Image (cartoon, rainbow, N blue to C red):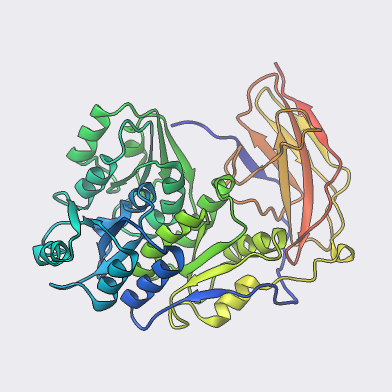
Amino acid sequence: MKKRFVLIFVFAFMYSFTSIAYASTAKRLAGETKYDTSALIVQDGWQQSDYALLAFGENYPDALSAVPLAKKYDAPILLTSGNSLPTVTKETLIRLQVKNVFIIGGTAVIPSSIDTELQGMKISVTRVAGRDRYDTAIKIAEQFPSPTEIMIVTGEDYPDALSIGPIAALKQTPIILVPKDYLPASVQAYLSTNKINKSYVVGDSTIISDNLVDQFPGSERIVVGVDKYERNINVNTEFDHLFSSKDFCLTTGEGYADALTGAAYAAKKELPIVLVNDNPPLITRQFTVDKLNQYNDGVPYVFGGSVVVPDSVVEYLLTLPDTDQTNKPSAPTNLVATPISSSQITIQWDQISDADYYHIYYTLHDPNSFLYSFINSDGSKLQCKWFPQSSAQLNDIEANTTVYFKVTSVKDGVESNYSNVASALTFP
């Protein structure tokens, strides 16, 4: 596995997070049932589409890898169940003038009567299915010729796959499902027949074992987290550069159906999808507030009704303070960078009494070019960009390398001006 820079926190600093104003109006896409909600999401995202994907709405395994395929064909994902299409799904296919449908999953899940019904609507049907969820994911991956990168997620739960779905879709990278500690035969065969040079792995060794990860070429764990919500924010932070829009999507992490159709919608609009529950963790609020602080006219799209994503949760995640310049916290001062070995640099600055947390930026290039990237918490791209400490240590840097740093403080979602720039050269 590829190593990442590792940042070690040095000083403890407790912080709180409050807010004082409601900054943005959410657009809620919700129907009476999951099938209605799916249709409303699609209606908002597509006026017409030659293609659509059809997934089983009552369980998650088969369709976990479907979002990149939806993006490839600019296709929405609709839901079905039973022996016939839900009325709202059928009406949506007609409205979009769909000519081709990919059915994701075998006939044990979506019966052949659905094929017959679609063909009766003059729609061409392609069924993408394998022996199990892992094989089905490979069948979807095979729709992408000559891939060089893949995303690896657990097939034993759905949130990680949904979190990575819009990102994999934008990169047109297949999503491969695996169990915790063995490599299915279909995945082995796929690896042997494709020249993969990069494998991104979502989750730590409690989700996907080190032994399994080492079997993937160019493997690199990109995010970990204490739960699915932290992993969701970490993966969005890791790939934030892919999202071209100022908006984002909110959906429940406690259910599958809304998030699946929503992930295809997010991919089309180039948005991150944020998973929530009734009590979102601080890291989720920090992400959404930071987004809205950067783009005051951003639109959060909420998938599902208030039963699944309560209004109180939406308001909590969208609350912003007054962003007047006079409301900014103090910028950090006296930033100092010190090399301590050929691969380690420590940074330290004066603690800001009114800061909730800090952002740390770094670059290996011209400090005047402003090509700084966030340091998030596992190295060059650390998993969390919210630092409660006023000191840190960066590890696994190449020898004889100059690194430039700057730091900001954040209070109630408002980011300060930059600190002074500090630099250090690792030992030869």
In percent of width and height, residue 412 lies at 75, 67
Q: From the viewer's perspective, is 259 left or right of 134?
A: right
Residue at 62% x, 58% y: name it: 246
Q: Compare residues 131 and 349 and report the one nearer the observer.
A: 131
In percent of width and height, residue 105 lies at 19, 56
Q: Is residue 248 above or below residue 181?
A: below
In percent of width and height, residue 234 lies at 54, 52
In percent of width and height, residue 100 lies at 24, 55
State the residue lying farthest toward the top.
Answer: 428
Instruction: Please identify the quadrant where the N terminus is shown.
Output: top left
- How many labels sit on residues? 0
Q: From the viewer's perspective, is 49 left or right of 232?
A: left
Q: Compare residues 241 and 383 and report the one nearer the observer.
A: 241
Residue at 59% x, 55% y: name it: 245
Instruction: Please identify the quadrant where the C terminus is shown.
Output: top right
Residue at 42% x, 46% y: name it: 168
Residue 114: image quadrant is bottom left
Q: Compare residues 287 and 98 and report the one nearer the observer.
A: 98
Q: Is residue 97 above or below residue 200?
A: below
Q: From the viewer's perspective, is 206 left or right of 402?
A: left
Q: Is residue 265 above or below residue 205?
A: below
Q: From the viewer's perspective, is 74 left or right of 394?
A: left
